Image: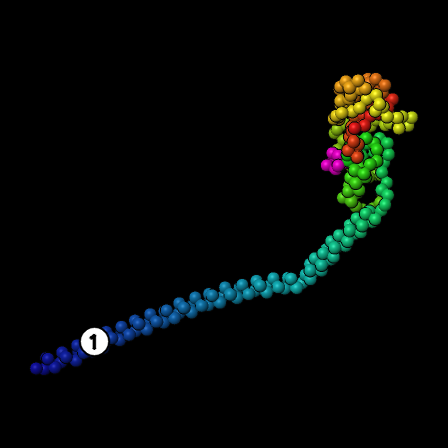
Amino acid sequence: MESISHSHPTHHGGSHQKLSWVFTFFIMIIASSALTMGLFAYADLDVIDHKMNILDERIQRVQEQPKLVQYDFELSGLEKRIESLEQQAVKKLNAKSHIDMPVGEKLGDLQFHLARLGYDVGSIDCRIGPKTQAAWKKFLQRLGGEEKNPEARLAELSKLSGDDMKRQKCTNIPPSIKNKSHDQLWQMRAAMPGKAWLVNAQDELLAVNVGEQLAGLGTVENIFQNDQGRWMLIAKNGFLKL
């Protein structure tokens, strides 16, 4: 009986000891979790604090360089000023009733280079006509800027179109035959640059090219379409028109 009574308290004490160890283990787990969460939270705070410091530095740099905003404002004002000056130049050019133009062969050069740039000059005939004037005016509007003499503008035009091609010289109508038409001898039925089809008084059809001889007119010097859209045959002793 005594051995039984002595063994019972020993078994009861072992159970309490096991419970104590289990409780201690759970406390350690909870404490470890709390410590881990605290470390993560601390790490997050470090990251946020680092980003805030970077943002503060950027704001400070912008505040220390207010001239950048000022330069942007001044540049915008300068662009508006340039645009205003260009508009004034166009208005001034439009209001100008007379446009200075080169004369003679230089006028032919002007027509040639304008045509190469895509302007409609009618024909390259060294004569001032509505189409040539309109094309020259459009080109001057494109250039803008200060006033210059026609030769200076022609030099700029030549640089833009290039000098890799040479044009045929204009054939000017001699003053003595300026109003001397030979439509009674010949009538022009059709034409193309450098060639025309004529009918004489006997209703005979004749094709003639530049450089050939034509009875009553002499050497054919040019066949072209003028600014009014009419075809012209210019010969040594007169002209025909269609």
Task: Give left or right: position of 199 versus 41.
Answer: right
- Where residue 226 sits in the image (x, y, percent)? 79, 32
Which residue in the structure is indicated by mark 1? 15
In this rendering, position of residue 66 left or right of residue 149: left
| Residue at image point 20% right, 78% down | 13
Confirm whether the magenta stretch covers residue 119.
yes
Amino acid beneath label 1:
Ser
Label 1: few (<14), some (14–19) or many (≥20) C-alpha neighbours in 10 Å: few
Number of marks present in the image shown: 1
Query: If the image is split into quadrants, where does the C terminus sit?
Result: top right
Q: Residue furthest left?
A: 1
Q: Where 176 sits versus 120, above or below? A: above
Q: Colour scheme used in the picture?
A: rainbow
Q: Residue at x 23, y 74 (%)?
A: 18
Q: Report which quarter residue 155 is drawn in.
A: top right
What residue is at 84 percent from the left and 30 percent from the top?
A: 105
Say which quarter of the image contains residue 212: top right
Residue found farthest to the right: 176
Horizontal and vertical percent position of residue 177: 89, 25
Does residue 103 belong to the magenta stretch? no
Can the viewer see residue 113?
A: no
> Where 6 falls versus 118 (above or below)?
below
x and y percent of residue 228 in the render? 79, 35
Range shown magenta:
113-120
Residue toward you, 210 or 113: 210
SS class, disc 1: helix
Answer above or below: position of 212 versus 231.
Answer: above
Quadrant of res 3: bottom left
x and y percentages locating residue 173 in the rendered image: 87, 27
Q: Is residue 230 visible?
A: yes
